[in-house]
Amino acid sequence: MSAATQPCEKPVLRDNVLRERGQREVFCGLTGIVWMHRKIQDAFFLVVGSRTCAHLLQSAAGVMIFAEPRFATAILDERDLAGLADAQEELDRNVARLLERRPDIRLLFLVGSCPSEVIKLDLGKAAQRLDRRFNGTRVLHYSGSGIETTFTQGEDAPLAALVPEMPATDAHQLLVVGALAEVVEDQFRRLFAAMGVGNLAFLPPRRAAELPAVGPNTRMLLAQPFLNDTGRALEARGARHVPALFPLGAEGTTQWLRAGAEAMGVSPSRIREATAIPEARARAAVAATAERLQGRSIFFFPDSQLEVPLARFVTRECGMRAIEVGTPYLHRAHLARELPLLPEEATLSEGQDVERQLDRCRDAKPDLTVCGLGLANPLEAEGMATKWSIELVFSPIQGYEQAADLAGLFARPLARRERLRV
Ligand code: SF4
């Protein structure tokens, strides 16, 4: 999304951004199903893909033994790929079988993959046809393919697909956008209630029928920095972006809550009253956990798009020294409040040329490297401590009560390495 589409405040630009357009090491958007299927409890994600896609999902999400699964892969075989079978007809048969067996499914996402895009299988048309046929189950589609994606687009794409489904409203409301763990969402509900913010909604909802409304008096507070298409779709429905830090760490959480509450007309004293004690508690908890991080250096490879707010947290609250902060895509408007808080000496890079970045990382010898799974094992073998960036997306890390856990996620690989050295 270009910054020009954002009507919010003028973004603060850093002119020293290193832009790279080379080979990238990232997961595809199918990975988003791993956390999204837990979030919307009556939704089902049907990937239309290959055995490779099925394996990726299975190994990333594991097998659901006790519950009915809420994702699956309709496998395109050689006959489909060679155009010898009618893939649309087979898809209809698969969906009919699924919905017959699982009448509890209220929302079905058909998820495109590299193979379905290569054979130009029109899932938009399929979703429309199946939606008409299966009254009572909404059928939508989005692409999770690895062609030009970062894995967190696997959240952005289904949320953007939900936006046209949202009812219209003129009510003045605060809409929190981005999947949060239920425990985190409940904490934020309590904090906003304590500040007197009554008209509060969350996207995604926990159930398909609870889809929030949107309109010109909706103030959109992003809980995740990677929701480019969703933000644009909500703005097209009239919502206005509330510029804020992301709710990571004590500082980020207070600034995020404050921005949302101010947009709803809450007074500064009431905001302070509700946030002062939990913020102080979070700061103390982070300080205790972050002792091991003080003065240590960190290098972020671009992977999740969470890198900028995470770097702000580890440098400002944990005393770490950021060498490079790489992000797959720098959304200047959504990150307008974050960018000025990054340390000047850190290299900010956008995109990737993996070999060159590996060279920079090896030269810098950081104490901790945050990267994707594909890079972590080789770097560990070279003696470097690493943190899987995907773990930071799967874990509940937002809010006051999770701030120390977030610091702990960075401290753990350093502790492990020290133990190995003894
Ligand atoms: S969508 Fe593409 S990148 Fe993702 S698992 Fe399937 S084939 Fe691989």
Image (cartoon, rainbow, N blue to C red):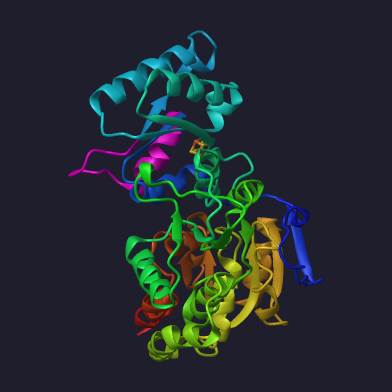
Q: Quadrant of residue 99?
A: top left
Extreme-right residue of the structure: 15
Q: Which residue is more in the foreground, 141 or 115?
A: 141
Vertical position of residue 248 compared to residue 118: above or below = below
Q: Residue at x 41, y 48 (%)?
A: 36
Most extreme residue toward the left, as rendered? 66
Compared with 317, 9 (above or below) is: above
Q: Position of residue 40 (x, y in %)?
A: 36, 47
Residue 12 in the image: x percent, y percent?
A: 76, 72
Magenta-highlighted residues = 50-71
Q: Position of residue 114 (x, y in %)?
A: 56, 32
Residue 220, image x, y percentages: 57, 60
Is residue 111 in sight in this rendering? no
Residue drawn at point x = 39 percent, y = 38 percent = 55
One can see residue 226 in this view: yes
Residue that protrudes farthest toward the front in the picture = 170
Instruction: Please state, as top left, top right, bottom left or bottom right, where the C terminus lies in the image.
Output: bottom left
Q: Nearer the viewer, residue 171 or 156?
A: 171
Residue plotted at (58% across, 21% down): 119
**Residue in the image at 70% along x and 78% along y:** 340
Is residue 265 highlighted in magenta? Answer: no
Marker count (numbered): 0
Q: Is 211 on the left or on the right of 316, as rendered?
A: left
* Location of residue 49 with respect to 258 vertically, above or below: above
Residue 59 located left or right of residue 307: left
Task: Say above or below: 147 vs 311.
Answer: above
The quarter holding residue 200 reads bottom left
